[in-house]
Image (spheres, rainbow, N blue to C red):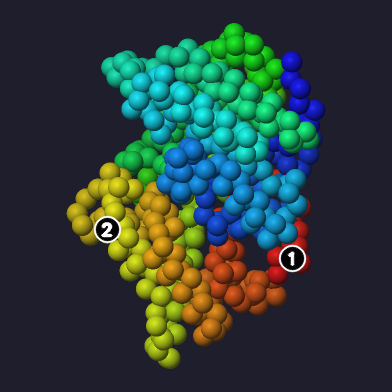
Amino acid sequence: MDQAVTLNPVQELLRRRNSSRQQGLYSCCSANEYVIRAAIRRAKEWDTVVLVEATANQVNQDGGYTGMTPADFRALVTRLAGEEGMPAERVLCGGDHLGPLAWKNLSEPEAMAKARTLVRDYVLAGFAKIHIDTSMRLGDDDPRQRLPVETIARRGAELCAAAEEAFRTHQTTHSDAPAPVYVIGSEVPIPGGAMEQEDAVAVTRPEDCRATLEAFRHAFLERGLGYAWERVVALVVQPGVEFGDESVMEYNRSAAVDLTACLKEWPGLVFEGHSTDYQPGERLREMVEDGIAILKVGPALTFALREGLFALERIEAELLQRRPFPASGFRATLEWAMRQDDRHWKKYYQGQEADQCYARAFSFSDRARYYLPHPRVAAAVETLLRNLDREGIPLALLSQYLPMQYQRVRSGRLPLRAEHLLIDHVGDRIDDYLHATIKTQGEPHVSNAAV
């Protein structure tokens, strides 16, 4: 029997979505501090919760590519929220693609053992939302056959059992902790976007949606996890959205109408949409209205961060024409780091060297995000921001390169400081998701703390 007494905020929000201002929830899938700060600041301005998610590749028991364990990531988000003056109860953490993804070349016993440890570590660190992803073939699965949904569900239930065991342990020292909610699904887009340009993406078939839900429900009940099944809040589907280097496949609600109609058969359940990056605001709103009430976004936010850094470096270059000082060299340093280690972009960016050089800087896939934590790149960012604050940013240049931030500086809503400008530019992308998920009357509330 479920011993949890505290309702998970995500579950409460989704239960009340038809009768409250919050119609859905977006998830900030990033480990970048500037991006997380942007998400927290916008949540304060909009008077809402903030959900920050880490993926199994980013953050795991071995450190992932960020070098962080789940406990480290949770501590990072908690620290940033405290520095931004965000109440702890309004800051939620989620785990994305949790399963054997990072160990898929191992046999099932080996890979699932590591996946159980992964899920336990996320729950013990206080993550409130767990996406169980067991959709990938493992080393001893037949590569010629589609992985049966029953196998996917059985493995998913195994990870849920590990999560529930970890939560009971966590509850002994955190009695008021909400029980985790779960997102399931076997039809999961590739984390971070498509590897190749595509003209269309097949929408999940209604019969596959039903088969997945039935298989997972049966697997949960078979393991005595009926109480945990009550906390399955969403199913990952492919609603027909994706992005590549220079293309974005927009949501077409008429193409997804049969899929979204399935939700009528499962009261209380919503769909979770991955790879919603770069969707126009009106398409995001349509997705939420149609029941795709959890919107995941990641690369689009670090893409906006890179845009802001490039814009600030152009301002720095103009200032250098008037009064020489040591330049940050941010873009050149980023390019150097990506050429030194091509493992995060090589298989994604095709074509001649000029094409790859362009993609490294401007691709929607935004593989550059993997290199922002590199010590030399991070140092170049710090130098850039310090140079601009020391030299002063002329309003004319701000208007030229960051016009939205110029307007907010002129109106007194935003300090004329480089880091604030950068974070606010990322916030502009977040606003599309908040407009889609929250009923609004005019402009969002702007907290004095934001300025």
Question: Which is nearer the eye, 124 or 282?
Answer: 124
Question: Which is nearer the eye, 114 or 130?
Answer: 114
Residue 134, given in percent of the width and then of the height, sits at 47, 24
Residue that numbered label 1 is attached to: 449
* Residue drawn at point x = 67 percent, y = 20 percent: 228
Q: How crowded is mark 1: few (under 14 residues within 10 Å), some or many (20 or more)?
A: few
* Residue 188 against residue 370 in the figure, above or below: above
Residue at the left extreme? 352
* Residue drawn at point x = 39 percent, y = 79 percent: 327
Mark 2 or mark 1: whose residue is earlier in sequence: 2
Residue 321, given in percent of the width and then of the height, sits at 39, 88
Horizontal side of 120 relative to 134 (left or right) equals right
In this view, the mark in front (2 or 1) = 2
Question: Which is nearer the eye, 43 or 227?
Answer: 227
Between the residue at mark 2 and the residue at mark 1, the CA separation in whole angstroms equals: 40 Å
Residue that numbered label 2 is attached to: 339
Q: Looking at the image, can residue 31 be seen?
A: yes
Tag of residue 335 = none
* Residue drawn at point x = 32 percent, y = 60 percent: 337
Residue at the bottom extreme? 323
Kind of residue indicated by mark 1: Ala
Which element is circle 1 on? helix
Q: Residues within 10 Å of mark 2 (few under 14, many from 20)?
A: some
